[in-house]
Image (cartoon, rainbow, N blue to C red):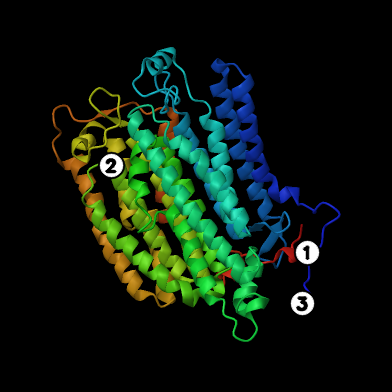
Amino acid sequence: MIPHMDLPVVTEGPPEINWWLLAPLLTLFAAGVLGVLFEAFVPARRRRGLQIGLAALALLAAFVLLVLQIGTLPDGQAGVTVAAGVLAVDRTVIFFQGTITVLALISLLLIAENRDGRDAFAAQAATVPGSEEERAHILAGSQHTEVYPLVMFAVLGMLMFPASNDFLTMFIALEVMSLPLYLLCGLARRRRLFSQEAAVKYFLLGAFSSAFFLFGIALVYGYAGSVNFGTVRAAVEAGGAEIFQGEGGNGEPLLLMGIGLVAIGLLFKVGAVPFHNWKPDVYQGAPTPITALMASCTLVAAFGALLRVFFVPFGTSAASWEPMLWAVAVLTMVAAAVIAVTQRDIKRLLAYSSVVHAGFILTAVVANSTDGLAGAMFYLAAYGFTTLGAFAVVTLVRTKDGGQELGDLERWAGLGRRSPALAGALALFLLAFAGIPLTSGFIGKFAVFEAAVAAGATPLVVVGVLSSAVTAFFYVRIIVVMFFRDPEGDGPTVVRAGAATGGVITIGVAATLLLGLYPGPVLDHLLPSSETGPEPVAVMVDQASTDTDG
């Protein structure tokens, strides 16, 4: 006899959708689609200005909408889910989305920078590097204005990633975010083959990580019978789906394998060891404005998603995943710090620096508390502004002919003498990375380490402090090279900073100092409650799809 089963009910009407809460995502989607139409129908000579204006307006409008949404969230609730429960809107999600939007708007300034009629992107990416066809496009002044709609779609995926309330939506957001970035990484104007190699590496490794992520989703579905975060959390609390709750049923192996494979996909995006090998090559080969976009916005989006996954659906199985994250955090902080000491290229060094910082933020995930969540949120925002400023400086330091960016650190000798303001700004960013007091980096590290100590992860904090000491060595080494070493020949060439690049550096300096000197206004309002200690799910939405508000 076939047992009775509750079959899904076919809906007869469309779901109720709260369009207001979806407005920021729809704004960026509309801007991306409109940008594609501009490419098809607007004359080439007018495209660039329209694309930049459209992208800037869309990002600004999305940020304003996010700010207005904060006041419309229901009182006494962590937040709500929308679109049949596939997306969550709460204070943490809005913070991550707002941070991404602001950082993307600043990155857009670097992307739009134009010197002598040329930007950082290839004149025609479809041509063979060094060919006559490519030379003809360069002489004709061709420009890749497709960059701007690609950035809009990438940022759309970044906003969806931490807001996802089920695993399939998160996978779609991951691909929407990643696919445009694969293309953008291969569009560098100079060192074209190197740029294309970086794009291919990123694409292949990203495809592998996405496959792991998707296989992990399948295993979690097998364990919980759903991909909705609220339902998965309830299944974990109950010991699995109904099929595993009888005598002899044990779905724990499915859950453990699912957590591990999902973690691989997320840890790849944040660049944690041993899934970090793509970062140095991609950061070095991609156009520097795109590197800045990835180093700031992608990291915030990826950590927002990682925090949500481990705190909501897997929050009650912390005993299963905390040892894994302990090991990954230790490996990330130690291995990346040691390898970074040997680097001679500035972009590769900043890539390994990003890996080390990912390890620091993982200590907040291990803390598994609201303090850890708030610390990670502050750290990500502070690091985003600082890293944008650092990459903006990199775009201005060139070889002797003023053409190609100067990557070799040894050739940066004398930069402090040639351009004291620029070298001083970079020195401030490096000190912030090192966690020196009175900078945003110090407050960020203090917040995540304090949360980890409160959660009993003191050994992890000791490793973090020692890794910070190692990283301080190579940050100070750059400062010494710039200010206290005589240049070879005439030293590095510093091109004049345009209004856009100068604005990015100024914003980076201001944010680094303000968040270091006056962190209170931000730290005190990150979460909707001043309570400390409870599980992060207390301030994050964990509703199942049947409990949604539209």
For the residues bearing labels 2 and 3, Cβ distance under 8 angstroms: no
The residue under label 1 is: 8
Q: Residues within 10 Å of mark 2 (few under 14, many from 20)?
A: some
- Residue 170, horizontal then vertical, whole percent: 58, 54
Q: Residues within 10 Å of mark 3 (few under 14, many from 20)?
A: few
Query: Which mark is nearer the camera, 2 or 3?
Result: 3
Lateral position of residue 446 relative to residue 401, left or right: right
* Label 1: element kind: loop
* Label 2: element kind: helix
Query: Which mark is nearer the camera, 2 or 1?
Result: 1
**Count of picture labels:** 3
Amino acid type for the residue under numbered disc 3: Pro
The answer to whether residue 523 shows anywhere in this view is no
For the residues bearing labels 2 and 1, Cβ distance under 8 angstroms: no
Q: Which residue is drawn at 44% across and 12% down?
A: 140
Q: Quadrant of residue 246?
A: bottom right
Amino acid type for the residue under numbered disc 1: Pro
Residue furthest toward the bottom?
247
The residue under label 3 is: 3
Q: In this view, does 181 lie above or below 548?
A: above
Q: Which residue is drawn at 57% across and 80% down?
A: 250
- The quarter in which the N terminus is drawn is bottom right
Query: Which mark is nearer the camera, 3 or 1?
Result: 3
**Label number found at residue 346:** 2
The answer for how far apart the CA atoms under marks 3 and 1 are is 16 Å
Amino acid type for the residue under numbered disc 2: Ile
- Residue 98, horizontal then vertical, whole percent: 57, 49
Residue furthest toward the right?
12
- The quarter in which the C terminus is drawn is bottom right
Mark 3 and mark 1 lie on one chain; the one further toward the N terminus is 3
